[in-house]
Image: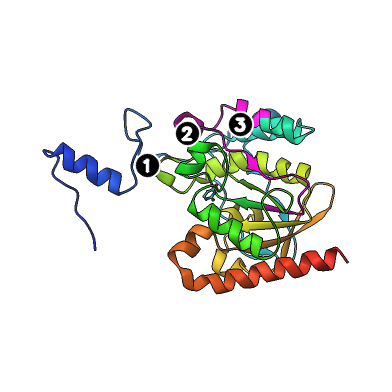
Amino acid sequence: MEESLPALEDPASLLKWYVEQGLDETIGEEAIDRFSLAVQPPAATPSPSVAPTAPTPFRPAAPSPAAAPRAPVPLESPQVVEDARALAAGCATIADLEAAIRSFEGCALKRTAKNTVFADGLPSAPVMIIGEAPGADEDRLGKPFVGVSGQLMDRMMEAIGLARGDGFYITNILFWRPPGNRTPTLAEQAMCLAFTRRHLELVRPKLLILAGGTAAKAVLDTAEGIMRLRGKWTSVRLDDGTEIPTMPTFHPAYLLRTPASKRQSWLDMLAVDKKLKEMNG
Ligand code: URA
């Protein structure tokens, strides 16, 4: 059912309507129509440091989602992505990376977020989970996946014997909550992905789980949706050639809305359990 916009003369109803639509924060004095903003063409003779660059994707291996590559990312500021990448590359430890992210001012989401949400669990855990972005609870508490969907994620992992802590380590591609939980823009994803890529290199988990379509598409650099990706092993190749076996699966928030899909997620969890046991000999 489509609800119409309340009359402008009734500001209280209008405000209530905005909140109901998920618009619960103002981030600027004036609305920006991003659809009307043209993507800047590259300068004729760019200097090497400001050459427009698409975000370096993780390199997925078989089955190759490269068959369905994503459209080029319309970066609002390629230089910011370069800055993030350079900053991340200079981090030798996870603590360095966390400090770099906390001091990074290139992502506008940081201005509206209450907290930087980095990670939870022990980096030595065998499994790393990457989700999408902090929600309201995570923003308030400064930890990933602490709301209802995070609790479901914990229960699913516990069912295969993996507890948050020494069983799995969890983070998101975004470190700041997008206002109203909107889907992060491709530019925001590209910026944060520069750090997430380094995060994965520093953690080097035995197995990676990508929770939900946004994380799966971003990390695997594919246009393929989660319906096709889930349940199939793929891998992410690190710079040194190491391949991390990777399982894309449904986001727990989707499972809360669509409980009938829990059966498929359970199969994904069983596949993770089996692979870990195989790896442990
Ligand atoms: N959803 C996510 O993707 N990440 C969180 O941290 C919380 C909810």
Q: Position of residue 39 (x, y in %)?
A: 48, 40
**What segment is highlighted magenta in the picture?**
99-128
208 above or below 103? below
x%, y% of residue 28?
36, 29
Q: Quadrant of the C terminus?
A: bottom right
Q: Which residue is depicted at the point 56% across and 34% down?
A: 116
Residue wearing tag 2: 113
Q: Give x and y (percent) for residue 223.
A: 57, 60
The residue indicated by pointer 3 is: 79
Image point 46% across, 49% down: which residue?
A: 183
Q: Nearer the viewer, residue 230 or 186?
A: 230
- Magenta residue check for 64: no
Q: Earlier in the sequence, mark 3 or mark 1?
A: 1
Q: Which residue is mark 1?
A: 36
Ranked by sequence position, the earlier of labels 2 and 1 is 1
Find out whether the residues at labels 2 and 3 contact each other: C-beta distance under 8 Å. Answer: no
